[in-house]
């Protein structure tokens, strides 16, 4: 964890190392021609671009909240090679650096259940046995997302891995919600759809300040144009609609937009023009 925390009223937002990987740049930018996206995001000779999986830790005066869980430590050598994982999942180490243990996490909010977001729900302990990573935490997921975990379509089979959910089903505290919910003061979940059928966002507000985590609707700062979406998106037109709606709504609130997959910029604010007006860390302001 190298990024300093962002203070939002009484809350603090940390970015924990959920492991990094490299994915095909073309897939990350869908129909956008490479000649355009490569100006914002450099690809290597194999057309892959570096991405992180930043687990957000939100500390409120009363609770410790995790948003998405990173790649986890269950990937096989073959999976690590396929996804070009070079930096391991270090969420537990990062928590320890803040004086926190796995038992200190109260809530886990899952934007959706793709392996890169749900991989850290269940971890291998020192003896190689599977355990819930955050055994005391209530895990929140949308109803339609959970239906697709239980009965994945052909396409989802490759990304909703049973090993990430079996233990949660058996002995975890799972809260399946249908639509929008105020989880606790200042923390709201909103169903978005778009990337997956049951994708949700997390809205944080404290002392008049707002941040929104759009998950895979806004994976990196290079996806600021609402039309720049991923080939991974299951409902592309819905993603474009939702991005236009949320960008407009949260911009008016002068909200931070926090990122999960961006290797450099951890959060940004958007100007009326749609351009990035402020970044976190501040030194990256363009
Ligand atoms: Zn993702």
Image (cartoon, grey):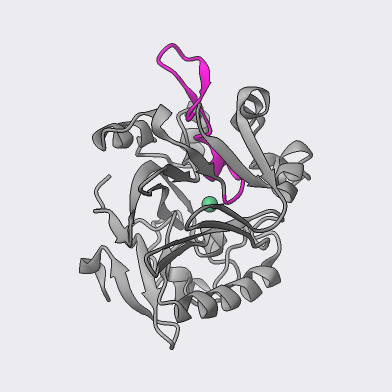
Rendering coords of residue 94 (x, y %) = 30, 37
Rendering coords of residue 121 (x, y %) = 53, 33
Whether 8 is drawn above or below 171: the answer is: below
Residue drawn at (40%, 82%) of the image:
275
Residue drawn at (26%, 73%) of the image:
285
Would residue 123 be found to the left or right of residue 111 on screen? left
Rendering coords of residue 199 (x, y %) = 64, 55
Q: Looking at this view, is 66 or 88 the one in front?
A: 66
Residue lying at the far left of the rendered structure? 283
Q: Report if residue 88 is visible in the image.
A: no
- Let me know if residue 131 is in the magenta part: yes
- Let me know if residue 260 is in the magenta part: no
Q: Which residues are magenta?
A: 111-134
Q: Looking at this view, is 20 or 175 the one in front?
A: 175
Residue drawn at (63%, 31%) of the image:
165
Would residue 137 be found to the left or right of residue 206 on screen? right
Residue drawn at (68%, 61%) of the image:
193
**On-image quarter of the C terminus:** bottom left
Label count reads 0
């Amino acid at each position: 964890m190298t990024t300093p925390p962002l203070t939002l009223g009484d809350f603090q937002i940390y970015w924990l190392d959920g492991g990094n990987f490299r994915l095909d740049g073309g897939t990350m930018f869908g129909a956008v021609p490479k000649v355009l996206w490569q100006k914002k995001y450099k690809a290597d000779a194999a057309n892959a671009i570096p991405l992180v999986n930043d687990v957000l830790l939100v500390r409120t005066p009363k609770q410790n909240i995790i948003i998405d869980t990173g790649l986890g430590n269950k990937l096989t050598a073959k999976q690590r090679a396929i996804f070009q994982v070079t930096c391991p999942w270090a969420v537990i180490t990062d928590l320890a650096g803040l004086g926190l243990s796995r038992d200190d996490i109260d809530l886990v909010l899952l934007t959706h259940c793709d392996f890169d977001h749900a991989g850290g729900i269940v971890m291998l302990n020192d003896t190689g046995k599977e355990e819930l990573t955050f055994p005391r935490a209530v895990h929140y997921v949308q109803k339609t997302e959970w239906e697709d975990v239980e009965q994945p379509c052909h396409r989802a089979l490759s990304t909703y891995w049973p090993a990430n959910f079996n233990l949660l089903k058996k002995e975890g505290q799972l809260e399946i919600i249908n639509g929008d919910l105020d989880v606790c003061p200042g923390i709201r979940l909103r169903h978005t759809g778009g990337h997956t059928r049951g994708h949700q966002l997390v809205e944080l507000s404290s002392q008049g300040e707002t941040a929104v985590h759009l998950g895979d609707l806004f994976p990196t700062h290079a996806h600021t144009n609402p039309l720049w979406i991923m080939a991974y998106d299951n409902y592309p037109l819905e993603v474009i609609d939702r991005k236009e709606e949320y960008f407009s709504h949260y911009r008016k609130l002068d909200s931070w937009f926090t990122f999960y997959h961006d290797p450099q910029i951890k959060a940004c604010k958007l100007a009326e023009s749609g351009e990035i007006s402020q970044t976190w860390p501040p030194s990256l302001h363009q």
